[in-house]
């Protein structure tokens, strides 16, 4: 027989009124503590977000270096640096394909290249990923303006002249963290300001 305690099935004896009050008070203190902690964390996150929002936008020109040749020859800035040396070396295994590329050079199209130097990353996979981002976006911007990837008009009925010249775009380290909007902004800026606006009238 028990005095002052109630048993419920096989569970432990129910607590007295004083014990239940103490437990409720402790839970209230814990809930209050968690609420204060949550407010503190939310305040820190909001301050962090607001501080980032107040940061000035970086200029798109800091994400790349550019070289454009309006009237290039077969050896231009869009070629690899050692192209001439390979093409003139009869003992080099790539001499024949490089020579054929120089012979088949077409001045009536746009020659361009995206370069990702070692300063971007020592890992080749990272450099290739950055190069593909800018290459695919630049091709997309060309198509939006009615040209294929070589600067030739897609619709011949509109009588557009083909884009010409040689363009070398060297990506800088800050572009590694560039957003989709920034990458598109860079490609559009280069195409409009440095290629289309400098074509023959």
Image (tube, helix red, strand yellow):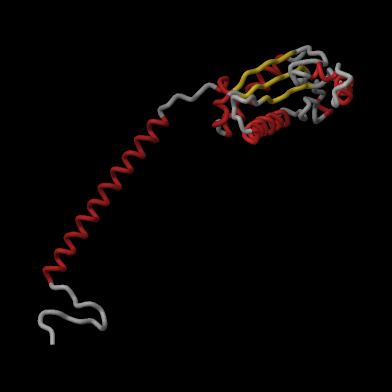
When the figure is inspected, residue 124 is found, relative to residue 95, above or below; the finding is below
> Residue at coordinates 18% horizontally, 64% vertically from top-left?
23
> Residue at coordinates 87% horizontally, 21% vertically from top-left?
91
Q: Quadrant of the C terminus?
A: top right
In this rendered view, identify the residue nearer to me: 18 or 138. 18
Q: Is residue 115 left or right of residue 46?
A: right
> Residue at coordinates 57% horizontally, 30% vertically from top-left?
176
Residue 53 rendering spot, x and y as whole percentages: 42, 31
Residue 157 rendering spot, x and y as whole percentages: 84, 28
Q: Quadrant of the N terminus?
A: bottom left
Residue 105 rendering spot, x and y as whole percentages: 86, 20
Q: Is residue 188 visible?
A: no
In this rendered view, identify the residue nearer to me: 159 or 147. 147
Quarter of the rendering containing residue 118: top right
Residue 163 rendering spot, x and y as whole percentages: 77, 21
Number of marks drawn: 0
């Amino acid at each position: 027989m028990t005095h002052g305690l109630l048993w419920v099935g096989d569970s432990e004896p129910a607590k007295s009124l004083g014990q239940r009050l103490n437990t409720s008070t402790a839970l209230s203190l814990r809930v209050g503590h968690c609420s204060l902690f949550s407010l503190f964390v939310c305040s820190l996150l909001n301050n962090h977000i607001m501080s980032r929002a107040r940061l000035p936008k970086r200029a798109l020109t800091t994400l790349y270096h550019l070289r454009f040749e309006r009237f290039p020859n077969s050896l231009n800035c869009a070629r690899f640096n050692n192209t001439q040396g390979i093409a003139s070396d009869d003992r080099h295994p790539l001499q024949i394909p490089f020579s054929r590329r120089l012979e088949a050079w077409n001045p009536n199209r746009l020659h361009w290249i995206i370069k990702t130097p070692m300063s971007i990353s020592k890992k080749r996979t990272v450099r290739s990923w950055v190069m593909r981002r800018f290459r695919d976006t630049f091709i997309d911007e060309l198509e939006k303006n009615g040209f294929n990837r070589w600067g030739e008009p897609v619709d011949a009925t509109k009588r557009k002249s083909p884009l010409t010249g040689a363009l070398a775009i060297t990506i800088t380290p800050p572009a590694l963290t560039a957003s989709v909007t920034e990458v598109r902004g860079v490609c559009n800026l280069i195409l409009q300001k440095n290629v289309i606006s400098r074509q023959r009238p």
